[in-house]
Every structure is written in C-alpha cells, then in structure tokens.
Amino acid sequence: MQKRFVALVLIVVLAVMVGIVGAQDDPYADVDPSGATITYWHEWDGRQGDGITAIIEAFNADNEWGITVEQLPLGRTSDVRANLSTAVTSGELPNLSGAGFTTDAMGFYLDGVLLTFDPFLDSPAWGLTEDESAALNFSLIDQNRPAYGPFEGQLLAWPIGFSSEIMSTNTDLLADMFEAGLIDFEGTPADTDQFRQAACAASELEGVTAGYGGRLSMAHVFTWMSNFGGTIWDGEAFVFTDEGSLAGLQFVQDLYNDGCMYFPDGGNFANTGEFSLGLNVFAPGSSVGVPFIQGDMDTAELDYNWVNVPFPQNDGRSFLSTSRRGVMMYQSTPEENLATWLFMKYWATNEAAQVTWIENAQYQPVNTATKGNLSEDFLTSNTQFNDFATALADADLTFIDVPEHPSQFDVSNAVEEMVSNITIGGMDVAEAAAAAEESANEIYQEDLENVEDA
C-alpha cells in the first residue's frame, strides 16, 4: 500500500510540475479575457464593411467570455495608416487594425508597439486545435514571417485572405470585335500577340476609349515584365534591366504609343471604373475588385459579360502577383491581448464567419475548408471569383516573389514612376529601367542596414 501511495504522490507532483512549466511557457495560460472590450480600426466599406460588421455582431453575441469588439471604419487604407501613425506617437493605439501588410507590420514592430501572433499560436490553452490548424494554409500565412533582422521569423500580421493582380476582360466587347472582323480569335486572348491585337482594335468600337485601361502600379508592370522573362528579383537585388524585363516594358510602351493603352484620370482604380462602363476592354486590377466593378455596372444599368483572368502568356510564361492583406495586433493589457486573439481566431477558423467574410469581401481564403462551404448562390452569381480560383490551380502559373521590407512602398513608388516615364513621359525604356533599378536597390539596402541597427 505504501508503494502505491508513493507512486500516486509522485504522479500528482509531476502533474503539478508540468502545469507550472506549461504556465511558464504560456504567458496567457492564466489570463481571463472575460468582459474585455477591444477596438478594431479598419478600411472596409460597402460589401466588405457589411461582412466584417456581421462577423463582429455574431462574435459579440455568442462568444463565451463576453468579449466586445468595437469597430471604427476609417475609410481607405491610407486613412488607416495615417491614423495609426498618429496613434503610435500619442500612445492611443487600437487593439487590432487593418492595413496589415507585412511591410506595415515591420514598421510597427520596430516602433515597439506590435503584438506578434506566435504566443497565441503556441499557447496550449488558447491556440488552434489540430483540426483548425490543419485547415489553414500556413504556406501563405508564414510568408508574413520576415526571417532577417530583429523579426527572426515571427508572425507579424495575419492574412485575412489573398488577392492578385488580374486582367478584367469584357467578353461581350471581344465578341463584338470578332464578329466585326477586327480580331481573328474568339474568347479571351491566349497570348500577348492576341492581347495586343484586341487592345489596338478596340477603339474601332463605338464608345470605347481604348482597348487597355492601364494603371500605374508595381504589380501591374511586374506581371508584364515577368511574363516576358524578366528577373525582377534575383535573391539579393532588384533586376529591371535584363532582356526579359526590358521586353515587357517595351511592350507596355508600344501599347501606349500606338494608342492601344491609356491611363484614366481619377486614381489607382479609375481604369476598372471605366471598365464597368464599357469604356475599355481590358483593365488590370485586384481580384477583389469584383463587387466594385459590378456595383458600378449595376448603378449605370449596364450588363456586360466579363471575366477575371491572369495576364496573357508570352512564350508559355504565366505569372501572378499576389497580395496578402491582413490585420495587426498591438500591445495592450494581457486581458485585451488575449481577447483580440480570440476574435481573430474566430474570424480565421469559424465556418460561418469565414463564409460571411469570403462571400462579402471576395478574397481567396487562407482557410482551405472555406471554399467547400460557399453557397451555390454566391458561386453562381460571382463567376469572377471562380475564374480566379481556377487560375490559381493552374500548375503552369508562377507567383512573383519579391522581398518584404519596411520601405517596400517606396520601391513601389519608384516602379510606378518608371511606368509613367516610359508612357506619359516618353522616356527611353532602358534608361527608365536603369534609374528605377538603382533607386529600388538603394531603398532596399538602406532598409537592411536600418533593420540591422535597430
């Protein structure tokens, strides 16, 4: 009996010791988030705003801890960034915010205000279940883990979905051109030659400004450069002056000079706004722009057939520039930190929340189980969502890979200036590419030095 008693005592002692070690390893093991109120600043409006409001209301009504999420829509992504910048100085940050690209998160991490997701993912008490973890695409999520500098592979931002630079294409206008003998192919262009043919013939149609409504964006021009064999990034530096990159840039300049491409007035997505009115046939933009394009069509009482497809291939090359829009958490009390994570976990893993979000926002989901839960009504009514999902499954598609770093938006500005220079400015392609390449690499190297010194 004594041996059995001693054994039982040892088991109890070991259990207590394991519990103590577990609590030490998990800083949130004993935290109680009950009754916490957290704030979320974001950029969502329209259908996306409806989606996040429905998710917040459902979470507030049903979560077992009585946590309340209060949202503050701030307008555009730039408005969120401006408010966050002010809040870092004032010390009055929200618990959660949008505008959560990794480049943004790096800056807030260096400011000492960011709360990484790792303590919660690693938490035995509050982390993901085995099934929840298995459903998430960590190959995408982990792209938000910068490996260098003080970041050391920590998860700085959580992607709430991903999008891509795609080509919105008016198939009705293409059919009209084919029937009129203006182009010699049916359907969407299979390659850059067919694309150019259609873009240059489109102005023959009544009411069409030009075939291609371009935009001054890095993702736009990087896709053309890559499809023509451009390097873009060689693992250590940006490369815009190799043969393929110059060929892609020359293709863009020729389209513009020949009147086949134009830049509408009115900002970054003015081209898709004019696409919705039938003023162009091709408009590059975000795969999540469907609700905005369709909304403009509905307002104008127009009903075009259109699709979202990758940029046309060149010599079999097909590239896609993706974007992982996410959210960031900020340091607060342990109770509010945990409450913020529990809301994020709900948004990322709850089946109803995921369906609500994807059907309203039209991002491609990071939760792989979500696609099978989308309603037939949504899939039937939003064919463009399936167009993009199908494109992503193409084994011949390659994703453009460029490094994340704090001043990535400055690189983007340099690339946009290059596009403007070779089109509106009429600058020599090689000269413009060399200037942009030099500027991009100076920005990147300065970032590395600043991060190492932080």
Image (cartoon, rainbow, N blue to C red):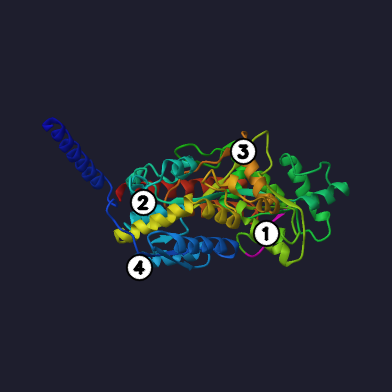
In the rendering, at what x and y percent does residue 263 appear?
67, 58
Left or right: 288 in relation to 202: left
In the rendering, at what x and y percent does residue 171 appear?
77, 50
The answer to the question of whether label 3 and label 2 lie on touching residues, with beta carbons closer than 8 A, is no
The answer to the question of whether label 4 and label 2 lie on touching residues, with beta carbons closer than 8 A, is no
The answer to the question of whether label 1 and label 4 lie on touching residues, with beta carbons closer than 8 A, is no
Which comes before the other along the chain, label 3 or label 1?
A: 1
Q: Residue furthest right?
A: 180
Which comes before the other along the chain, label 4 or label 3?
A: 4
Residue 407 showing in the rendered view: no
- Name the residue type under label 2: Thr
What residue span does the magenta drawing correspond to? 261-266
Viewer-nearest residue: 230 or 155:
155
Residue topped by disc 1 = 293
Which comes before the other along the chain, label 1 or label 2?
A: 2
- Disc tally is 4
In the rendering, at what x and y percent does residue 403 appear?
46, 44
Of marks 4 and 3, the one in the foreground: 3
In the rendering, at what x and y percent does residue 437 appear?
51, 45
Above or below 397: residue 163: below
Residue topped by disc 2 = 116
Badge 4 element: loop
- Name the residue type under label 3: Ala
C-alpha separation, residue under disc 4 versus residue under disc 3: 43 Å
Badge 2 element: loop
Whether the magenta-drawn stretch holds residue 262 is answered as: yes
Q: Residue at x 67, y 59 (%)?
A: 293
State whether the magenta stretch is mostly helix, strand or loop. loop
**Which numbered tag is attached to residue 393?**
3
- Name the residue type under label 1: Ile
